[in-house]
Amino acid sequence: MARVLVVEDNPRLNTLALKVLCGHGHQVEQAADGATGVELALAKHPDVVLMDISLPGMDGLEATRRIKLACPDLPVAALTAHAMPSDRERALEAGCDCVITKPYAIADLLACVERLAARSVPAAAVPAQDGTA
């Protein structure tokens, strides 16, 4: 199963994602803000990042840009309550691979994680931080 980083500041949604994803065999790391999300994404090399857009401090769009700058092949799914077409367009322009609108159906979340994890570059293929293979 997939290694998933959930970047979400709402404790209830964080708990829900943890229960659902772990219940389906995924390994989950969590971050409550954008800066920590970027740090964990770059250090842990998850298969998929689920990124809330409205985060304290660094928002999810900026966090996604930073993740994609360092790891362009790392799939990021935006989790957002903002459902306007312009909001979706901004998320995609920031580098998100898909957008999941809150409140989301559990089946949609799982399908997105599985679809993006199937495209993810295995951690063994990610170059070491010191430049050695």
Image (spheres, grey):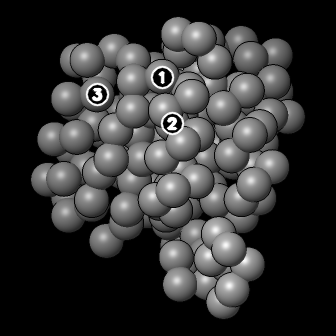
Callout 1–callout 3 Cβ contact below 8 Å: no
> Which x, y percent locates residue 21?
25, 50
Q: Is residue 98 above or below residue 57?
A: below
| Residue that badge 1 annotates | 33
In terms of secondary structure, where does tag 2 sit? helix
Residue 15 location, quadrant:
top left
Of 105 and 32, the residue lying toward us: 32
Of 38 and 83, the residue lying toward us: 38
The residue depicted at 39 percent of the width and 24 percent of the height is 32
- Using a 10 Å C-alpha cutoff, classify the residue at mark 3 as few (fewer than 14 neighbours), some (14 to 19) or many (20 or more): some
Residue 113 location, quadrant:
bottom left
> Which x, y percent locates residue 80?
55, 20
Q: Residue furthest front?
A: 130
Q: Which mark is residue 118?
A: none
The residue depicted at 49 percent of the width and 32 percent of the height is 36
Q: CA distance from mark 1 to mark 3?
A: 12 Å
| Residue that badge 2 annotates | 37
- The amino acid sitting under disc 3 is Asn
Residue 101 visible in rendering = no
| Residue that badge 3 annotates | 14
- The amino acid sitting under disc 1 is Asp
The residue depicted at 53 percent of the width and 10 percent of the height is 56
Judged left or right of residue 99, residue 70 is right
Of 92 and 8, the residue lying toward us: 8
The residue depicted at 39 percent of the width and 32 percent of the height is 31
Q: Is residue 98 above or below residue 22?
A: above
Callout 3–callout 2 Cβ contact below 8 Å: no
Q: Nearer the viewer, mark 1 or mark 3?
A: 1
In terms of secondary structure, where does tag 3 sit? helix
Q: Is residue 30 above or below residue 10?
A: below
